[in-house]
Amino acid sequence: MTDAPRVLDLTPGADGPFAHERDAIVSRLLRRGAPIPDRAPAPLSADFAPAAVALARENWRHKMVREHDSAALFAALAPQLMAAGLPVGVHLTCLRAAMDELHHGDLCARAVVHLGGQPQAPAPPRPPLLPAHAAAPPLEAALRNALFIGCLSETVAVGLLARQRQQIAEPFIAAINRQLLGDETLHARLGWEVLTLLLPRLDAPALARTHRYLSVAFAAYEAELLTLTAGPPPPADVLEQARALGFTDGAAARQTFDDVRDHVIVPRLHSLGLDASAAWRDRHAAASPRP
């Protein structure tokens, strides 16, 4: 039996019988700053080229699916952190991150609507699965996934959103970007705090395994980033306008990754006792699929 196609529908009002719970959670727990309305109070603020609007709209639709599905990763990480014996505050923050990501999917859907689209998209048959690292002790499994999600993926996301904050010219899109940036900063911090708590508890063999895993993680994240940002660049004038609407282009994503890796990720990992420079250098000798 094959899985039926999964369609993500984030149309406002499509939350079913628990719409009131969704509103209460977002209102009480998740918002930072001014609330973002379901729809922009006005149409686009400038006469953007149709090609730029279409490019940004599809990009936000893709982000909608990814943000929504990434909630599953944080939800699956929480029991791993519990098995590693971390404080309750860590578990609560991880679950909050899962709720944040669901909220992000909703915010991206609002951007799609603002750009003239329907907040619906085909999605993979099931949300992404968090690696179990079954051969590793629970502490190492939690550390590896927190490293990949928080210290790599979410830390780079902070860099991308910060860069886009300087480029976005559309007010409603800018408000969504600010919300995402505030949340992703917390998610990245979660990863770094977990590493700070768990790395001192590793013995020498476990630390050596973690060094080897770091090369695998670098290779996997680089491959994932290149896949997500593949494709020829649009004409320069279209690209500039699309960036003003929150479009993430491949060249900027790669440059941001290189900058964040060199100036944030590698130095912080070094400060925690991991030879991140060697891990990055040796990444092509490691297994490339996500571990």
Image (tube, helix red, strand yellow):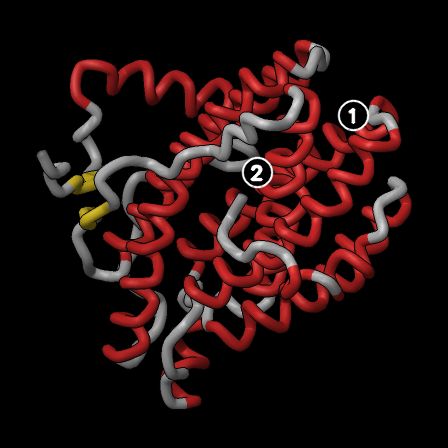
Q: Front-most of 70 and 118?
A: 70
Query: At x 82% / y 35%, what residue is drawn?
Result: 207
Query: At x 53% / y 77%, what residue is drawn?
Result: 251
On residue 226, which mark appears?
none
Q: Position of residue 16 (x, y in %)?
A: 17, 21
Which residue in the protein does label 1 denote?
198
Count of marks placed on residues = 2
- Which residue type carries mark 2? Asp
Identify the secondary structure beneath mark 1.
helix
Query: At x 49% / y 53%, what residue is drawn?
Result: 289
Is residue 277 depicted above or below 71 in this figure?
below
Which of the two discs, 1 and 2, sits closer to the camera? 1
Query: At x 55% / y 73%, what residue is drawn?
Result: 252
Is residue 60 depicted above or below 5 in this figure?
below
Which residue in the protein does label 2 denote?
183
Mark 1 to mark 2 CA distance (whole Å): 23 Å
- Which residue type carries mark 1? Leu
Q: Earlier in the sequence, mark 1 or mark 2?
A: 2
Determine the image quadrant of residue 42: bottom left
Q: Residues within 10 Å of mark 2 (few under 14, many from 20)?
A: many
Question: In which quadrant will I find the C terminus?
Answer: top right
Q: Position of residue 21 (x, y in %)?
A: 32, 14
Q: Position of residue 41 (x, y in %)?
A: 31, 49
Identify the secondary structure beneath mark 2.
helix
Q: Residues within 10 Å of mark 1 (few under 14, many from 20)?
A: some
Q: Is residue 173 left or right of residue 52?
A: right
Q: Is residue 110 left or right of residue 206?
A: left
Q: Position of residue 218 (x, y in %)?
A: 64, 55
Q: Front-most of 1 and 92?
A: 1
